[in-house]
Amino acid sequence: MSDRAEVVAGIDIATAAVRVVCVDAHGRVRARGSAELPPPRRGAGGRSEQDATAWWPAVAAALRQATVALPAGGGEVVAVAVAATSGTLVLADGRGEPLGPALMYDDRRAAGLNARAQEAGAPRWQALGLSVAPTAALGRIAWLSGAEGHADALGHRAHGNRHAAHEAARHVLHTPDLVGWRLTGGPVATDWSHALKSGYDARAGEWPGEVFDALGVPARWLPSVRAPATPIGTVCADAAAETGLPTGCAVRLGMTDGCAGQLATGAVRPGQFVGILGTTYVLKGVTRDLIADPSGALYSHRHPDGWWLPGGASNTGGEALAHVPSDQLSALDRAAADRGPASVVAYPLRREGERFPFVSGAARGFVLGTPADDADRHRATLEGVAFLERLALERVAELGVAVEGPLWAAGGGSRSPLWTRIRATVLGRPLRVADHAETAFGAALLAASGTLHPDLTASAAAMVRAGRDVEPDAREHAALDASYAAFTAALRERGWLR
């Protein structure tokens, strides 16, 4: 193990802001920094874009804020890793300068190309248990290589005077690839987590050549791919001057924000799973072998150590409470706790369609019965999300995966003691609420892997706190079990659940 004074920096490049945490070998956060990003521009045709030239200045500012805030004697940053949104990318020239706006993770302009990609690579996707979604980055790469996308990118260049050699080169860069270029002073490999939605096959260890050939994507545009936590260079003098990082600081590959958030809970070994209750509900875990879900609801990233990270994201979650003013949530929780299990059963879906733990474009929210009052309605909403979580774990079990020990809990919804207790009771197992379940902390664990500690498992063991366990309430188990039976029966009656 390295000296205690050494720290690592984890960088989270989200949609609206960049966040940085500096963490020591024992998981203590020594400093933080943040900087805002311009909001995405969304328009006709499903376009969703962001100014990619804003990424590096924001990262540099957040790093500078954090490094300046490190306490005297708090140590030097010895490694850094970047996590970002999954599927956001930009076309850049030979100097790593964006040739146009970044195409965001939710950009739908290439939905038709993604449908073609699904067909062209059908055997590969089937082996991976993966489907090419309408918003997959793969289609956007093909769109950029086409006449319309190529002209659009070149028309948005930030700079007009470039050397011809740089003008001829083209690079598809995920967000961390561009930042890694700035940190090290040259092009870097990408990690197989950020590359997943761009089509990278982590099972075969290759880009899908047959798919890119069918879509006309030049192979030379794609970066090389390595495992997360792999060292890809060191901080150059220019980056050191802008960020406060020392020259020679190691730069290691990160993972997508969702994967980094999972790692931050400590769920890094086979059998460990985490339920992340944010705007939507996400279940993620670790398995030794690749799990192929024929429905496509569950898909897998690759673990840095070669295992797999199956996961699925629902369209239901904390968003079910979006209509409730935040200053009223605590009072409603107290009233719902006092009344006990709800008298009605709710599926609190506020959108059209569901994607996990079952896939149905026809799915719509419902309430079976009439709530007695606001507390009853609120309680039914909390229970409905918990029922969906149980259904997700049952789906994982159907696919042959054993979830061991307590289920880790993260996300804003896990800060509600009532909701966490309801979830534990519905599941019939303890929930372990994580202390530092944030993306930047997960990126810091990857930066520490091979730097402060031998690998990711050792980093998590030394740096992640145990959290607190919330036990099921045996007094409410029978009532919630009956409501869950009614919930699943209603889904089957509507034809959404087989």
Image (cartoon, helix red, strand yellow):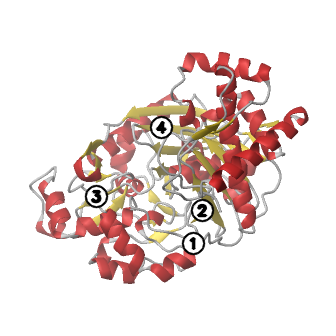
Q: How many neighbours does mark 3 have within 10 angstroms: few (below 14), some (14-19), or many (20 or more)?
A: some
Is there CB contact under 8 Å for labels 4 and 3? no
Residue, disc 1: 129
Is there CB contact under 8 Å for labels 4 and 1? no
Q: Quadrant of residue 373?
A: top right
| Quadrant of the snapshot with the C terminus | bottom right
Is any atom of residue 218 visible in this view?
Answer: no
Decide which of tag 3 and tag 2 comes sooner along the chain.
3
Separation of residues labelled 2 and 4 (CA atoms): 29 Å
Local secondary structure at mark 1: loop
Decide which of tag 2 and tag 4 comes sooner along the chain.
4
Q: Nearer the viewer, residue 175 or 5?
A: 175
Residue 480, percent from left and from top? 80, 39
Residue, disc 3: 109
Residue 190, percent from left and from top? 44, 64
- Determine which of the numbered discs, if any, sits on residue 19 in the image: 4
Is there CB contact under 8 Å for labels 1 and 2? yes
Is any atom of residue 256 visible in this view?
Answer: yes
Q: Nearer the viewer, residue 202 or 163?
A: 202
